[in-house]
Image (tube, rainbow, N blue to C red):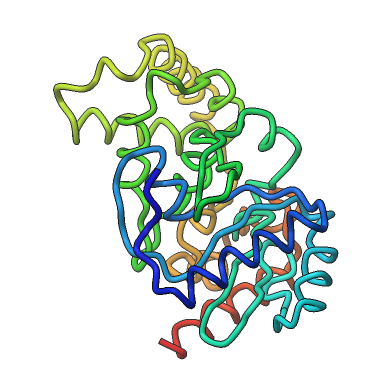
Amino acid sequence: MQPLELDPQTYDFYRRSLEILNKAKIPFLIGGGFAFERHTGIVRETKDLDLFIRARDCQRALQVLSQAGYQTTLSVSHWLAKAYCGDNFVDLIFNSAMGACEVDDSWFEQVVVDKVMDMSVRLCPPEEMIWMKSYLMARDRFDGADVAHLLRACSDRLDWSRLLKRFGAHWRVFLSHLVLFGFIYPGERARIPSWVMDELIRRLERETLDSAASTERLCQGTLLAPMQYQIDVKQWGYQDARVQPSGNLTETEVINWLDHLQQEREEG
């Protein structure tokens, strides 16, 4: 794989970051633009280096990067840390922002090995990239096109059973992207195995019958767009699906995440 176009300073920073983590024997996977290019052939600019690590390795990663002279911070306690050197930075990601896509051991079981910046590295599997990107449906960040491009490029080598298992109870999110894929690429619908569509449609039919009389006041929109569904949970009395017991986050973690989003918007 040809590396993305990087200026020499950024290239050296990224490569040094990888060398530091390798030397410390901290397992990581490269995601973001580098992995997306490898899986789809689509090249685009990247503003940072996305490294996916297990939560248990985060503090040690921050420690070794700090000892190497980087400025480090745990940006959002449940999913994101950063390491800076000047204007360049590395994202250390160990969950999704809504807390539903933890980087666990299975992320490291079916990795793709390739060269990035003349180094042999492990890239995020396409299944996990599809899984995590499928939840990004906010007004200012919708990754539906990325999901469609990953499905188009990787359909013949995806572990579809594992991908279904990843979505678990959120299988409707996956089905929505598969339906959109058939709309986006009418001539490519056969790329989606028929058994996958049959299984999900059976679930939809069964769920529709089972939940006809449901009175549950739960809003799962917050898993897709954190800002656009605030009125539902703050004024309309819906339970926030991110928050325990429905989700994996505490109220404090949600507040901290929203504060982080607001700060990012103010910084441009």
- The image quadrant that residue 67 belongs to is bottom right
> At 39% across and 62% down in the image, what residue appears?
138
The answer to whether 228 is drawn above or below residue 116 in the figure is: below
- The image quadrant that residue 92 belongs to is bottom right
Q: Position of residue 153 (x, y in %)?
A: 33, 31
Residue in front for this viewpoint, 26 or 134:
26
The answer to whether 246 is drawn above or below residue 249 in the figure is: above
> At 84% across and 54% down in the image, what residue appears?
56
Residue in front for this viewpoint, 79 or 115:
115
Q: Residue furthest top?
A: 195
In the picture, which quadrant includes the N terminus? top left
Image check: 63 left or right of 207?
right
> At 47% across and 65% down in the image, what residue appears?
229
Q: Position of residue 117 (x, y in %)?
A: 50, 55
Label tally: 0
> At 83% across and 72% down in the image, what residue appears?
63
The answer to whether 121 is drawn above or below residue 209 in the figure is: below
In the picture, which quadrant includes the C terminus? bottom left
